[in-house]
Amino acid sequence: MNIMDFNVKKLAADAGTFLSRAVQFTEEKLGQAEKTELDAHLENLLSKAECTKLWTEKIMKQTEVLLQPNPNARMEEFVYEKLDRKAPSRMNNPELLGQHMIDAGNEFGPGTAYGNALIKCGETQRRIGAADRELIQTAAINFLTPLRNFIEGDYKTITRERKLLQNKRLDLDAAKTRLKKAKVAEARAAVWAEEVTKSEQEVRIAQSEFDRQAEITRLLLEGISSTHAHHLRCLNDFVEAQMTYYAQCYQYMLDLQKQLGSFPSTFLANNNQSSSTCVPSSSATTATPSSASVTASLSSISNAAATSSFEVKSSSGNRKARVLYDYDAANSTELSLLADEIITVYSIAGMDSDWLMGERGNQKGKVPITYLELLN
């Protein structure tokens, strides 16, 4: 029974306090009651905390968009995080592109120039995809997590203490209002002096509690400067992670460009000649060209043929080449290769542009040009 009576009294006191705060808040809004203002330093700290929270949320959100542009994927990761479960692993965009390129290259044939180039590009895209995963993981740990911890931890504590400060301020102003009314009633001899004394004591208690809560709130808000310093270190980590990522991507593409640039000139000349000869045949089927366009087309074909003839002639002599990959001969007309060995190569009239003749000592046979890097 005593416990029940205590709970009833506590509920009644809480209800009375809530009602008193509500009345005070309403009268302040209507301009019918005075309001205790916070000191300028505390107001400045509160403004700084709100500004920090606002921009931290915006930076965090946009960083997540940068790292994962797909909104559906972000939503899936959010749901799995709330369920405290690991999201299923899926290929990212560079990895998907790389896999398609590799599959296409294998379909066209690794021994062909285009097929081999696709495989090389696909492998590079997969390496970029792996670097992308590493960037996301590093940024999440070193940058996003500290920002999220501030929003969900430190700032929630500040908000809670700030609300307590607001309640203590309402209690103080309500007590001041009651004291003011009691003094007015005392002057009219409507209340006893004890009532005024009681109101004065309530004001002193409310003032003490307000000052104490203001100090607690001030100490928490002054920690925002430390938060900025911590976020600065996290920002440096994020920049370093981005720098590493872009440096890796640049190196991967540089290596790829060197590999693609190692194709023999006979292959490039063949492609140029094919693309040049396609233009007049197409225009001839669609319309009757003028004499000027015919002259220009013949001149273009003549120049392409001359260029092609020069390049084939220059490559017809013996040249040294480094083997890029192992190659197993498909028949007796081909020559098996070992990576990094140096062989002699040369072209033969009428040979497929994707192949050269290779020699290693007394051994001789056809070799795919995409497996070679010409040295001279």
Image: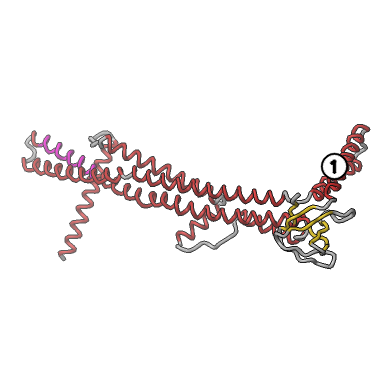
Furthest residue toward bottom: 331
Q: Residues within 10 Å of mark 1 (few under 14, many from 20)?
A: some
- Residue sitting at x 17%, y 44%: 208
- Residue sitting at x 18%, y 57%: 9
107 over 311 or under it: above or below: below
Q: Is 176 inside the magenta-drawn segment?
A: yes
The residue to which callout 1 is attached is 307
Q: Quadrant of the N terminus?
A: bottom left
Question: Which of these two is toward me, 258 or 294?
Answer: 258
- Residue sitting at x 62%, y 54%: 94
Q: Relative to residue 221, is residue 56 drawn left or right?
A: right
Q: Position of residue 221 (x, y in %)?
A: 30, 43
- Tell me where residue 49 sits by quadrant: top left
Query: How many numbered marks does the figure carry?
Result: 1
Q: Is 105 inside the magenta-drawn segment?
A: no
Colour mapping used in the image: secondary structure
Q: Position of residue 322 (x, y in %)?
A: 73, 56
Q: Position of residue 263 (x, y in %)?
A: 76, 51
Q: Relative to residue 220, is residue 211 drawn left or right?
A: left
What amino acid is found at the position of numbered circle 1 in the picture?
Thr
Residue at disc 1, secondary structure = helix
User: Looking at the image, can residue 166 be seen?
Assistant: no
Question: Which of these two is toward me, 155 or 300?
Answer: 300
Question: Which of these two is toward me, 328 or 195?
Answer: 328
User: Looking at the image, can residue 212 be seen?
Assistant: yes
Magenta extent: 168-185
Q: Relative to residue 127, is residue 161 drawn left or right?
A: left
